[in-house]
Amino acid sequence: MKKDMLELCAWVIDQAKKAGANESRARLTRTRFVEIGYRERKPETITEATNQSLALQLFVDGRFSGQSTADLRKNALAEFVSGAVAATRLIAKDQYRSLPDPKYYQGQAAVDLRLMDTDYSRFSPEERHRLVKALENACLEAGGQAVISVEAGTRDSFSEQAAVASNGFQGYREMTDYTLFAEMTAKDEGDRRPAAYDVAVSRYVKSLPDAAVIGRSAAQRTLAMRGGKKLKTETLPIIIENRGVPRVLGGLISAMSGPNVQQKRSFLMDKKGQKIAGDILTIVDDPLIVGGLSSNLWDNEGMATRKRTFIEAGVLKDFYVDWYYSRKMACEPTIGGPTNLIIPPGKRSVEDIMKDLGRGILVTDFIGGNSNSTTGDFSVGIGGFLFENGKPTQTVAEMNIADNHLKFWTKLVEAANDTWKYGWLTPSLVFKDVVVSGV
Amino acid sequence: MMKKMTRRNFVQTGALAAGALGGVSLMPGAWLGLVANANGKGYFDSQFGVTDAICRKLLETALSKGGDFADLYFEHTISNYLGLEDGQVNRASGDIDLGVGIRTVKGDQVGYAFTQDLTEKSMLAAASVAATIADSTAVKCAPQFIAVKAGDYYPVRTLFTTVPVSTKLPVVQSVNDKIFAKSKLVTKVSCTFHDQQKRILVVTSDGHKGEDLLPRSFLYASAVGEKNGRKETAGWNFGGRRDFSYYTEELVDRLVGEVMGRLLVAFEAVQAPAGEMPVVLAPGVTGILLHEAIGHGMEADFNRKKTSTYCTMIGKKVAEPFVTIIDDGTNAKQMGAINFDDEGIPSEKTVLVDKGTLATYLHDRISANHYKIKPTGNGRRESYRFYPQPRMRNTYMLGGPATAEEVIKGAKKGIYVQDVANGQVKIGEGDFAFYVSSGRMIEEGKLGAPIKDMNIMGNGPKMLLNVSMVANDLKMAEGGAGACGKGGQAVPVSFGLPTILVNSMTVGGVKRQGA
C-alpha cells in the first residue's frame, strides 16, 4: 500500500498548495490490529479493526495550524483541506513556524531497522488463541488456590506510515508489534485483593518470550504483593525496579522538553552543561536500534534521526527540541521527545546489590503522584518489598517518596544489570538516603 | 498498550488531559445543521445514508452466528483548539473523527470491530468480524427501533462549528492580556480554548435507537512567575458540556483570578508534611477523592469478576449515616452528563452509598444481565474504537450537617486540600492516591501556611469509615479538561464534594512530623 499512501499524501499537499498554503506536510497512518482477551478459559473479548488517520500541518502566510481527519473520502478530504487553509489565515502570524530546513532531512542512517516481521502474514488466529491460552494456563497454575481472577491477552498490529512535505521530504515505513499480557488478582487478608501483571512486547513473533513464562511471572508478582503493610517513616536506600524507573524519570525528562524550557516551566532551563545528577546517570536516546520498539530513521518532522546523549555522567548535555522550538530558542534541533531512551546498565544483579545494602526497600509499584516541572518537586506513592540482610522480609504498600529532582538524582549510586526491554531501556536504579514516608 | 491492558485506573483534571481534545472548525456548511433534517431523518441518515434498513442488516450480520445482543455506535466528532503562546494566538488545530463500532455480546463475551468507512460493504465486513465471538445459529434483530428515552442535560443553542475563529480568538487573547496586567511577577502565559461536538447514534438489536449531540469545551490558562529568584507556575480551567455562550468576559475575569490567586500564593508555600494526619478537603474538584476511593471500585465489571475490594459489601455499612455518595448522569452541563449512555440506556442518578450503606454498583448491560437487575446508564466508551464498559459520570457526596468552619476546627492539626491534579486507584486492594497541587496547613483548627505538590494516599473502605464530618456546602467541579482513564479509554467525568474531614490519610510531603 506504500504507493497508494504516498500518492494520497502528495495529493493532499497539492490540494493545500492550490488552496493557498505556502508549505505543508501530510502524514497518513494506517494500523490493522487484533486483540484477544481470555478469562475463565474462554475468549472474553475479540477486537479486530483498521484505524486510519491523516494529519496535515499547514503554513499559510506565516501562520500555522495542524489538522487531522479520519474521513478519507476524497471529496471530504478536499473540503477538509480548503477549510483548514482558510481557518489558518485567521490566527496570528508566528515568525518561527516553518517546515524544517531540508538539510535536516538528509543523512538518514544507512541501517535496516527491521521494524517489520516477515512472519506477520503467517500469524494465524489459531496461533493467537494458542498464545493466550498458554498465558492464561500458566498464570492459573502458578496462582493456584490464591487466584480470584486471571485475565490474559495478546495484541498484534501491522502499521504503515507515509509522510510527504512540500519542501522535499518523502518517507514510508511499515512495522509490526506483538504484545503478550497476563494479570492476576489474588486472595489476601480481609478485603484486600492485590493484582499484578506481566507483559512482553516485540516487533517479531519469533522473539517473544515463552507465553508460559509471562503467565507464570504475572502470578508470581501477584502472590508476592500479598500481605502489604505501611511501615514507619524512615530514611533508607531504595532500589527502583527497572520497569518502574520511567515513573520517576518522567518528571526529569519533562523538564528537558523544548516547550517547557522555552516557556520557563522547567527547573532545568538554565542548567545545560551543569551537573544535575550523580555520575551514574547517563541518558542516551538511540532511535537506530535494530528492531527497537521506538526506532525510526526519521522523526515526526521528517528530520533524520541519530543517537544522542542527553545526560552524560550526571551532566545535562541537551534538551528535547523540535524544529519550531529550536527556532524560538535559537539552537540546533535535536528531537521532539524520547525514542529508545537508554540508561546504561551496571554490572551487578539486584539480588547482589540487595545483599550488599543489607536493609532497604525494593520499589516495584507506584500509585498516584505527579511532578512539578517548574520547581522539580515530586511526590509519588510506592509499594514493593522491605529487604533485610539482603532478603525480602515484608511486602510494603501505601508508602510515599517525595523530593526535588535536583536533589533526588544526586542520590543515585548504582544501576543494576537488568535493563527492561519493553519500553524505556532502563535498569533498576539504586538511591541512597531516601525518605520513605508511611505511618 | 500497557495502559490499555492494566487495571491502573486514573484521572486527570488539568491541561495534561487536554490531549483528548483536538483543535479548528472546518466542516463545510452542509454539515452544520443543528437539528435533524425537517423530513424527520436523523443526522447519520441524512448525512451518511445510515437508514433503519441498513442498521437492521448490520445487526443481523452481527448476530449471524448467534449471541444475546448486538449494537451499533456511529460517531462523528469535530474538535477544535486555539492556542496562545508568547503573547499571541498563533496555533490552531482541528480533528474530524468518523466511524462506527459494531459489537456482538454473548453472555460476558464480546466480539468487536469498527470501521471508518461508512459504506455498506465495509460496515458489513466489520459486523461479520464482531459475529465471530458466537458459534451457534443466527438470531433475529427486533423488527422496529423505538426512540431511546433521552434527557436534555446540555442543550446546545449554537454549534461550535458555527462560531468563527475570529469570535473565539479575542477571548483567548484577553486572558493573556489580563494576566500580564495583574502582576509584574508574571513572565510567561499560555492559554488554550478547546471545543468539541460529538454526534452519536446508538442502535440496538433489541429495538432501541438514540441520537445525541454532546458538546464539550474548556478555557485553560497557566502563568509562570518569578519572585526573588523563585519560579512558580499555576493553571486553572473552566468548562463542561457547554456551548460558546458560557465564555463571557465575566468568566475570563474569574479564570484570571483563579490563576493569579494560585500563582501568588505559591510563592508563600512551605514544605508539605509527611505521615498520617487528619485531612480536610475543600469543596469542588476534591471530589476526585470519591472517584478513586469508591467510584472505580463500584464499577460492576470489577465486581462481577470479584476483583474489586467492594465486591462483597453491598448492603453493608461502609460509612457514617451522614455520608451519601451519588454517581449522576443528569447534572446539567457537567462533564459527565449524558442524555443516555453509549448502549442506549437512559441516564440516571445512581446512589452508591445511601446514608452510610453500600447500595448499588454502576452497571452496563453485561453486568446488569449478570446480576439480573436494570442497567444504571453507566455503559460508556471513549469513541467508536472501543466497546463500552461501566464508567462513572459525575460523582459527588451530598452535603451534611456541619459548617465548613466547624469541619476545619474539627481537624485541629492536619492539612487542608484545595486543588487536586490527578489520582489513581488499585481496584483490588482499594488503595488510592491523589495529587494535591495546592492546599494549606491546619494549625489549632485554623487554616495556616500554603503547601503544594504532595501525593495523598489511603484505602477506600478505610477512608469511608474515617469520614467524620461533612459540611453543608457541596460544590461541583467547574473544569472541562478532566478525563478518566480505564482500560485505555478516556471519558469525560466530573466530581463534587462538600467540605469533609477524613480522620487520617497518608500525606506524602517531604517534612517529617516533629522534624
Image: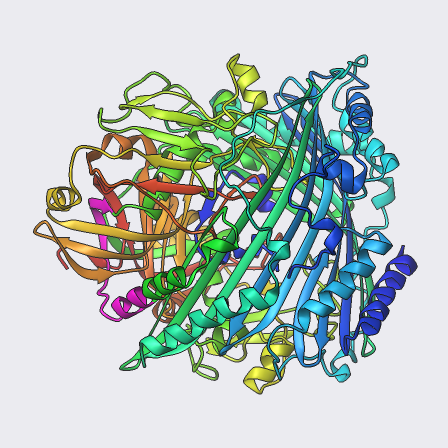
Q: Quadrant of residue A302?
A: bottom right
In the image, what residue occupies the spot 37% across and 18% down?
B314
Image point (86%, 50%), residue name: A118
Instruction: Give the side of residue B404 with respect to residue B428, left or right.
Output: left
The residue lying at 79 percent from left, 59 percent from top is A79
Which quadrant holds the C terminus of chain B? bottom left
Lateral position of residue B146 relative to residue B364, left or right: right
| Image position, residue B390 (x, y; %) | 53, 30
> Among all residues in the image, which is located at the extreme bottom?
A330
* Between A260 and B330, the one nearer to me in the picture: B330
Magenta region includes residue B277: yes
Residue at the image point whose x is 27% and y is 24% from the top: B356
Residue B208 appears in the figure: yes
Estimate the x, y position of residue B46 in percent, counting from the top left.
77, 39
Left or right: A223, with A131 as reference point: left
Out of A319 and A78, give the one closest to the viewer.
A78
From the viewer's perspective, tell me whether residue A73 is left or right of residue B12. Answer: right
The residue sitting at the right extreme is: A3
Q: Does the image show residue A299?
A: no
Judge whether A362 appears above or below A184 on screen.
Answer: below
Residue that lies at the very extreme toward the left in this rendered image: B444
The magenta region covers B260-281
Residue B512 location, x and y as percent? Answer: 20, 56
Residue A199 falls in which quadrant of the image?
A: top right
Chosen colour scheme: rainbow
